[in-house]
Image (cartoon, rainbow, N blue to C red):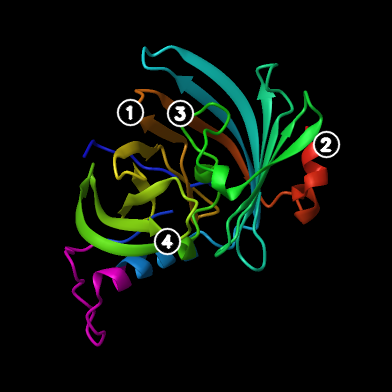
């Protein structure tokens, strides 16, 4: 595996534990041995719990699209995220540049068990388009991220299995496999590298419905906010079939803003600026 530095969206975008692990985990004294499935679920749940309680935050993003020849185009956008009492974050992306995408806004209502609800506001048409769950495997705004990738990665939407631990750069990572339980995912499975100290998602490999290695996400340049929450400064999604890639550069994180749930409705989507 390629050397990986440290960081996490998105959101968008989770992490985990260490230890010398194969198909079972050496348990702490007094704890019964875990199966690989139990260990995988425990690790994924612990990573999620570490990230809860932030309330809300905003950030700025630069999206860099690269084709197979390395030619680049750039987009500037803003992100808003808020937690809900029942779980399932609400997220809004608003595009500012270039002019042909300015005012385009994307809203996600994530759910723990049910498919995420997603809407895209197209200012040229002055209408909101719902992205059905069966269409969320499509490309998000021409990038190598899919609509599915832009939602929260809820633990309950996957089965989990711990495979092994191994070095990842200067860190030690666990490697787990998660398999979507819903019928509409564009992926058959995903392999997730999580560092043992900070529970940060370092790398994710995505396999398509034919089980071909389709894409790899690498997270870098982590910083800790509020003495607790790790956030990545750079996410790179590479499509191995097309040779294209998309980089998301994150900046200007701000936690505890004056956002509320009324800022994450379809009505708010239309007036997002």
Give the position of the N terminus as an image quadrant: top left
Q: Which residues are magenta?
A: 19-39
Q: Position of residue 215 (x, y in %)?
A: 36, 36
Of residues 216 and 241, the one nearer the viewer is 241
Question: Dot 4 corresponds to which residue?
Answer: 158
Q: Is residue 14 left or right of residue 73?
A: left
Q: Dot 2, how many residues are within 10 Å of its Cα: few (below 14), some (14-19), or many (20+)?
A: few
Q: Is residue 20 magenta?
A: yes
Of residues 50 and 177, the one nearer the viewer is 177
Question: Relative to 242, does residue 260 appear above or below in the rendering?
Answer: below
Discs 3/4, front? 4
Where, by quadrant of the figure, is residue 141 drawn? top right
Q: Position of residue 96 (x, y in %)?
A: 69, 25
Q: How far apart are the two marked residues, 3 and 1, measured between alpha carbons?
A: 17 Å
Secondary structure under the numbered disc 1 in the rendered image: loop
Question: Dot 2 corresponds to which residue?
Answer: 271
Q: Point out the tag, 3 or 1, that comes first from the N-terminus.
A: 1
Secondary structure under the numbered disc 2 in the rendered image: helix
Asked if the residue under mark 2 is in contact with the one under mark 3, i.e. CB atoms within 8 Å, the reply is no
Q: Taken as a whole, is the magenta stretch helix, strand or loop?
A: loop
Asked if the residue under mark 4 is in contact with the one under mark 1, i.e. CB atoms within 8 Å, the reply is no
Q: Point out the tag, 1 or 2, that comes first from the N-terminus.
A: 1
Q: Residue at x 50, y 55 (%)?
A: 227
Q: Dot 1, how many residues are within 10 Å of its Cα: few (below 14), some (14-19), or many (20+)?
A: few
Residue 125: image tag: none
Q: Residue at x 79, y 34 (%)?
A: 127
Discs 1/2, front? 1
Q: Is residue 247 left or right of residue 126?
A: left
Question: Relative to 225, does residue 235 appear above or below in the rendering?
Answer: above
Residue 247: image tag: 3
């Amino acid at each position: 595996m390629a050397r990986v530095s440290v960081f996490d969206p998105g959101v968008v975008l989770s992490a985990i534990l260490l230890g010398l692990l194969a198909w079972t985990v050496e348990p702490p004294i007094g704890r019964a041995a875990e199966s690989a499935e139990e260990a995988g679920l425990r690790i994924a749940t612990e990573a999620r719990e570490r990230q809860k309680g932030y309330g809300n935050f905003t950030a700025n993003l630069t999206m860099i699209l690269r084709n197979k020849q390395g030619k680049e185009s750039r987009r500037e956008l803003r992100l808003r995220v808020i937690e809900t009492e029942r779980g399932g974050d609400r997220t809004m992306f608003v595009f500012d540049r270039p002019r042909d995408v300015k005012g385009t806004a994307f809203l996600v209502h994530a759910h723990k068990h049910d498919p995420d609800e997603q809407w895209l506001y197209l200012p040229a048409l002055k209408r909101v388009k719902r992205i059905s769950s069966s269409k969320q495997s499509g490309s998000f705004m021409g990038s190598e991220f899919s609509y599915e990738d832009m939602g929260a990665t809820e633990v309950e939407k996957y089965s989990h299995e711990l495979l092994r631990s191994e070095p990842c750069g200067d860190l030690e990572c666990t490697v787990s496999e998660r398999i979507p339980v819903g019928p509409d995912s564009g992926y058959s499975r995903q392999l997730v590298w999580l560092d043992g100290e900070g529970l940060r998602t370092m790398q994710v490999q995505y396999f398509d419905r034919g089980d071909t290695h389709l894409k790899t996400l690498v997270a870098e340049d982590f910083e800790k906010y509020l003495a607790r929450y790790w956030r990545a400064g750079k996410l790179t999604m590479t499509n191995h079939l097309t040779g294209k890639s998309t980089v998301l550069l994150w900046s200007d994180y701000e936690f505890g803003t004056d956002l509320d749930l009324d800022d994450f409705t379809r009505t708010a989507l239309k007036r997002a600026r």
